[in-house]
Structure formats: C-alpha cells, structure tokens
Amino acid sequence: MRILLTNDDGIHAEGLEALERIAEALSDDVWVVAPEYEQSGASRALTLADPIRVRQIAERRFATTGTPTDCVMLGVNDLVPGRKPDLVLSGVNRGANLAEDVTMSGTVAGAIEGMALGVPSIALSQMGFYEEGASFEAAETFGPGIVKKLVELGWPADVVLNINFPNGPVDRIKEVEVTRQGFRDFHIRHNEKRTDLRGRDYYWVGFRQLRSSPAEGTDLRALYDGKISVTPLHIDLTHQTTVHDLKGRLGGVPPKA
C-alpha cells in the first residue's frame, strides 16, 4: 500500500513524525509532502498568486511553500512517481478538529483534496494540546489499528474520515465511536487587540479553551467522554430540507422587486 502523508502544522511538526510512525506500521511505501511552515486554519486554500517552491529533504520526503491542499495535489500529480497513492493520511494535528472547526482545518482539507483526486483519505487529530501532559501517545497507540480496519472496511469515494483521539492515559481509552459532526452552542474563536512597539494596533486570533454541551452521538461528545471519534465527512454542504422547502415557494418564474 502506497501512503501519502501531509499536515497543516508543517514539515517539522511532532505530529507529522507521529503520523510517519503510524503509516510505517502499515506500509514500507510511505511518502511525505508537507508545508514548509505552519498552515493551521488554511482550510482548502490553493496558492494561486505565487509560485509554489518544493524542497526535497530525503528520498520520499518533500516540503513546499504551499498549503495542505497544494501539498496533496503536488504529491498525487507530480512528486510521487509512478502509480498514485492508495491512501492519504493528513495529520496528526496538534489539537482536535471537531464540529464547525472542520470547515477551517488545513488537516481536514488535506484529506479532502486526496478524496477529490480519487484517493481514499483520512484526517487524524490529537486532542489536548492546551492541557497538561499532552502527547501524541493515543494517536500512535490506536492509529495504526483503526486506519488498517477502516481500509479493510472501505468507505464511499466522496467521503473523508475524520479521526480525533482524546487526551489522557491510553489505558483509559476503551472505545471508538462513529459520530456525526457536532456544532458548539457558543463561539470559542476570539481576537485580542494589542499594540506594537511603534504604537500600531494589531490582532491575535485564537480559541477560548471552553467546552460546550454537545448532544450524544456527536464528535464533541465522544471526545469529552474520552472516546476516539471517527466521523465520515463530505463536502456537499447543501441543506436538503431547505431545498425542498424553498422549491415550493421560490421555484418557477423569478420574482421581481
């Protein structure tokens, strides 16, 4: 099995090293194409206004100036010679990618690009990197077995799988739950205004480390309960209930003001 790895934390990220160990437990044909610098929050951004530079670090290891989406596109189309990869793994992200965050996640975007190019793809994230004692131990312990089982089971070609691992001692992690995407009941993103040494204002954007009250069956609830969450995602954002509702009232001759 040929596996292509990427991430959004950058080529030097500890989580990418963890992902390499996960992949090497499954295959000896592992390739890495990752951003030169951190691209967290890049979502599905493409680099269109600047050239993308590629630096080869080792025989099967490349760093690029592009986004996670760029990296997967270049890996599948150019940098991995011969047949295209059988699997794309993106991560292991430093911090969970849950609920509405998945639409901003460069980690999830790397998996989506793999799917769009016809390669089964999985995003992996490790919760708890703002908590004491955080590590990638859970991802490394359970990742190989879960990925192997998912590959054996298979999933639809238009779906990516989003795996999130809870923080804490691995002997306390007893369950994998297949979940749906949740949505927080309050906003955790915020910006902080500061002033530089020349008297000019600037802003830092970040996240409040607060927990919502998610419903059972959601990715958020599973992680809060110490379970590994596996969420099938797809990029069809159509809300079918509203489509059917509006068709009966808006469809037909276009209204005029």
Image: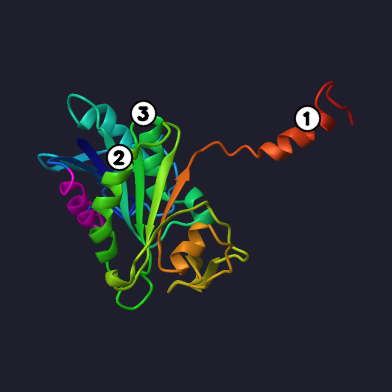
Disc 2 from disc 3: Cα separation = 15 Å
At a point 58% along the width and 39% down the height, the residue shown is 237
Spot the residue most to the top: 253
The residue carrying pointer 1 sits among few (fewer than 14), some (14 to 19) or many (20 or more) residues within 10 Å by Cα, namely: few
- The residue beneath circle 2 is 151
Image spot of residue 250 (x, y percent) = 82, 30
User: Magenta region: which residues?
Assistant: 13-26
Indicate the quadrant where residue 31 lies.
Answer: top left
**Magenta stretch holds residue 24:** yes
Image spot of residue 180 (x, y percent) = 52, 51
At a point 44% along the width and 64% down the height, the residue shown is 223
Name the dominant secondary structure of the magenta segment: helix
Disc 2 from disc 1: Cα separation = 39 Å
Numbered circle sitting on residue 247: 1
Residue type of the residue flagged with mark 3 = Gly
Residue 67 appears in the rendering: no
Front of the two marks 2 and 3: 2
Above or below, 133 against 83 in this view is below
Q: Which is more N-terminal, label 3 or label 2?
A: 3
Above or below, 228 against 154 in this view is below
Question: Residues at badges 2 and 3 in contact (C-beta under 8 Å)?
Answer: no
Front of the two marks 2 and 1: 2
Residue type of the residue flagged with mark 1 = Lys
Numbered circle sitting on residue 118: 3
